[in-house]
Image: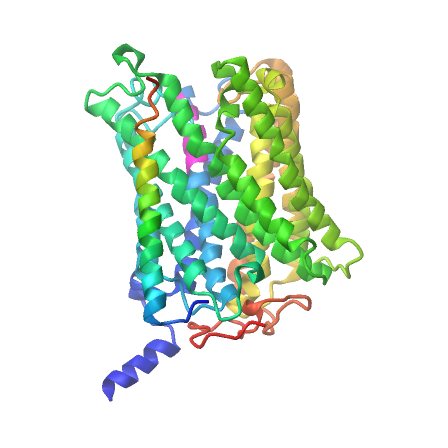
Amino acid sequence: MSTATTHDEHHHGAPSGLMRWIKTTNHKDIGTLYLWFSFIMLLIGGAMAMVIRAELFKPGLQIVDPQFFNTMTTMHGLIMVFGAIMPGMVGLANWQIPMMIGAPDMALPRMNNWSFWILPFAGLMLISTLFMEGGGPAFGWTFYAPLSTTFAPKSTDFFIFAVHMLGFSSIMGAINIIATVLNMRAPGMTLMKMPLFVWTWFITAFLLIAVMPVLAGAVTMMLTDRNFGTSFFSAAGGGDPVLFQHVFWFFGHPEVYIMILPAFGVISQIIPTFARKKLFGYSSMVYATASIAFLSFIVWAHHMFTTGMPVAGELYFMYATVMIAVPTAVKVFNWTATMWRGSMTFETPMLWAIAFVFLFTIGGFTGLMMGVAPADMQYHDTYFIVAHFHYVLVTGALFAIIAAVYYWLPKWTGHMVDERLGKIHFWWSAISVNVLFFPQHFLGLAGMPRRIPDYSLQFADWNMVSSLGGFAFGLAQVFFLFIVIRTIRSGEPATDQVWEGADGLEWTVPSPAPYHTFETAPEVK
Amino acid sequence: MAQQGSSRQSNHTVITVVVLVLIALGFFVASFFALPT
């Protein structure tokens, strides 16, 4: 009898105290943990970006020494990619995928707990390198050999171990998502009925399983080159430093899509809701996502045009790269067509989603420019590429995560977000982010190199403008923290459906979503 | 279609996990054989 009582309690409420979070196997708890971890990392990585922009505010060495500046660019990149964007997307997946396919939880809840709890330790290990003898990694987030092998500080071995742990966490998370999508769907939820966010994550999970082990292979070879006398990347021992770049970018290019495909999924959920229309071209969206994922595997050497390769190689990688514009354009067209003649309203999540469509597309276009091999000889390693990938990853991936938080926060907390504050946050961010990154196109085209703490006088004006935009954008995200905490604590009660045009299983459960949902599978028609 | 909580579903999950782990291990091992010959 007592067992039965305990059983009931277990199923109806959330346990309390610290142990709830450490031992949890609940997908909503783990999603929350991921999202908070992601936000903390965003603030840490953001603080490093502030150091970078402060140093670049004026020409000449201002605040930090060049070695530390390099450490900041390296750690900023690593922390934002592996600590902020990826865990942010996994947090959204954890919260939403089971609710969207009518499953009671993820397929492997205990592994889910492990996937998350590895992360803080990996993150701490990475950050701890800053305090070690010789300083932290300073070779750029791409950690090219021999900078990361022969000439790297001792702390690099801790960096390697941190990357191993991050990779392990990602692979386990990806296995969990695929197992959940394949085996836990409610009756009637066929693959082609799945919400697009689930589809994009399903495809992303396959990318993760294919490329994270290659990253693990790259850092393992680095480890043995550094400590055990092998010469994978050392020409002196018969190896090849260019091999490192190939192995790294075989991981690195799909990695870009790992960060952006779930963002496509988020936008494909939000736009139909606020246009009050079904998503235009659902099946073409699925096929476009799969095509982008496939193409992402066969274009890696476009990052290496200036490294040197046969002309035939340059031509192949150039054509394959610009081909990605086709399925991506299908997506942008479908989002636009969804809005066409819709009954649109512009609540906060929709504003972020529309900004995504505009600004991500700018990042996509500059990507095309650099995909053209002869043009890339000019752009390579300049601020133009810094502008390009920040349009893709900040106004693309980060904006999508913020849009998703505004969209689903009422479902998570039971409170509506204060629209006035959300809109202030949006306009503040949307303007400042363009002040921050748009001038970097001009700087790059004029020849300013990336990863350099000092620059010639002719770059001074736009650097100052960019830095001012950076400080404003950084401050806007602290305001976002305030809005999120305020919404968790108070706000208008949210209805079950939350948004008038919202459609899908997650909007059929109460707001806030109960600790356990869909213990009995819903019937999907 | 998956039936939640059934043993068939559990078997499918195990098979899915084993296949995915093997794919991951395959890519890990393959990365060491990328050396030019």
Q: Is residue A313 left or right of residue A319?
A: left
Q: Is residue A185 left or right of residue A443?
A: left
Residue A123 in view: no
Residue positioned 63% across, 62% down in the render? A418
- Which of A442/A207 is in front? A207
In the rendered image, the residue lying farthest to the left is A228
- Looking at the picture, how far across and down is residue A443, in whole percent? 63, 21
In the rendered image, the residue lying farthest to the top is A236
Locate the C terminus of chain A by quadrant: bottom right
Residue positioned 53% across, 20% down in the render? A381
A484 falls in the magenta region: no
Residue positioned 69% across, 42% down in the render? A358
Q: Quadrant of residue A392?
A: top right
- Looking at the picture, how far across and down is residue A369, in whole percent? 64, 25
Q: Which residues are magenta?
A: A67-78
Locate the N terminus of chain A by quadrant: bottom left
Q: Is residue A68 left or right of residue A162?
A: right
A73 falls in the magenta region: yes
- Secondary structure mostly taken by the magenta-highlighted segment of the chain: helix
